[in-house]
Amino acid sequence: MNAPATELTEQTHRRGGGRLGRKAMRSAPIASFPTLVRQIPVYEIVPDEAVELIHEESLKILEEVGCEFRDDGAIELWKAAGADVRETRVRIDRALLMELVSKVPSEFTLHARNPERTVRVGGKNSIFVPMYGAPYIRDLDNNRRYGTLADLNNFHKLAYMAPALHSSSSVICEPMEIAVPKRHLHIIHSALKHSDKPFMGIVTSKERAEDTMAMAAIVFGEEFVRENPVLVAITNCNSPLVWDATMIDAMRVYASHNQPLILAPFALCGASTAASAVGAVAQVNAEALAGVALTQLIRPGSPQIYGQFMVTVDMKTGAPMGGTPEAAQMMYLMGALARKYKLPWRTSGFHVGSKLNDAQAGYEANMLMHAAILAGANYIWHSAGWLEAGLTCGYSKFATDCEQLVGWYKYAGGLPFDDFKEAMAAIREVGPQGHFLGTQHTLEHFEKAFFMPSIMDFNSYEQWKAEGAKDHDTRGREKARNMLADYEEPKLDEGIADGLKDLIARREEKLPDSVS
């Protein structure tokens, strides 16, 4: 149904031939799905003329209104490229903009420290990535509290063990007990130590991005990371129409190292955009394209991901909402635009506003993931754990999301016909008034014929009551607890592990304990 895991380049094989490669081959105790290759058609919510209208208006925004780039280096790059620059406001001619955007590869390989976990991003390929950035967690006893490093370790372990997650993200939750200037070192170390899947970089300062790249170089080798994507980092445009110095600093570090960034405006539709779904898309498209274009001034041909984070605002309270119909509709529009530009693109899958792993969370998540899959998203972020508009990561939500991802993986993989002939033969074998439970076809296919979740309950009421009358949230916490009990670390090569610890110790000596 899906293509095998991406084969490695000759250079990767040379790298993998040493101690790290041998260790990776021994460290595959869990099942892990390869890149999801979608076998269902994308859904076009509006005709091509409407997509062209939005595209045209986005170009006019950048030509006539312009975008702020609050960074001296970025301003110099735009001046050298011939853009209309007045102080920090940059107006970009459409020909220049589209020439730069066209330099981005339509697909790229994202390497993992275990080559078996390497994935493809772009085209018909999709990957699922857990959430990012929660200060709070909802723990195994259903208490809401600040996240700790132990919690972050646990979420990276769960991400490693979830077959349908293709990445471990990075700051799934904030380890709040660690000083902010030093926190990034422990976040990246946790992602690299507890999982051998691809991970995400830190973008909160130039120095933290540089530390991330230094840690990646220890794991993958300096030569390899100069040319090959090994992580993805997120940069957000401050809607409306501002790329600030912090984001551009991180952009410069990662793009210059040939590492892909998600260029994603953070749009609260109705507050930081017009109160219009199509109007918001036109603005966000302009913001994202401006960011994509800047990466190509930094390093032409570097792989990048066109992105968006668009949630509607509750106009009664100003609070961001999660899985609304407008959020789904905007996702379809962004997918159509990404295909027009031939860009890999990111959206969010299970980001919800609900405080608990309850029915509201399920409704919201289904609304958005359905749109993400049918819109053809390549990098489906926030696909496990997200609660409370991203303020909280829940253990139960993480486990139940991961189970649902297996179903979505199967859904997007399309309907296989490989056993159709045998199924027809089974009908003839059984005939009227029989049953199929003992047929050879059933015995050979029952394990993979249908999605068989373990957390969802389909027993009779009596059986459910006898087993404790547990709701879905409770079963999710039990699943997470059992997964953690079964976890076995995919150990790093000893020399690499020591190298990471040494770098962390040296950097911690130089970094302060508080933000000045």
Image: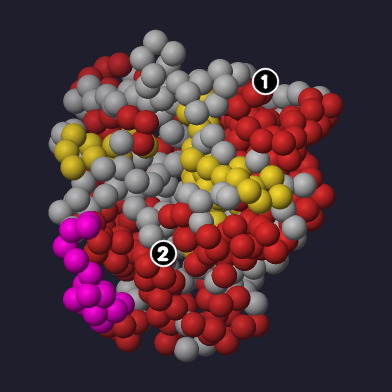
Residue 116 makes an appearance in the image? no
Vertical side of 257 occupied by 361: above or below: above
Of residue 454 and residue 23, the one placed in the foreground of this image is 23
Magenta segment main secondary structure: helix
Q: Amino acid at mark 1?
A: Pro
Which residue in the protein does label 1 denote? 432
Q: Position of residue 7 (x, y in %)?
A: 64, 71
Instruction: Give the magenta-colored segment's residue range.
Output: 500-516
- Earlier in the chain: of badge 2 and badge 1, it is 2
Residue 97 makes an appearance in the image? yes
Assess whether residue 313 is covered by the magenta stretch: no
Q: Position of residue 262 (x, y in %)?
A: 55, 51
Residue in the picture at 79% in, 33% down: 56
Which residue in the protein does label 2 denote? 206
Real-space CA distance between mark 2 and mark 1, rounded to the nearest whole angstrom: 71 Å
Residue in the picture at 78% in, 42% down: 340
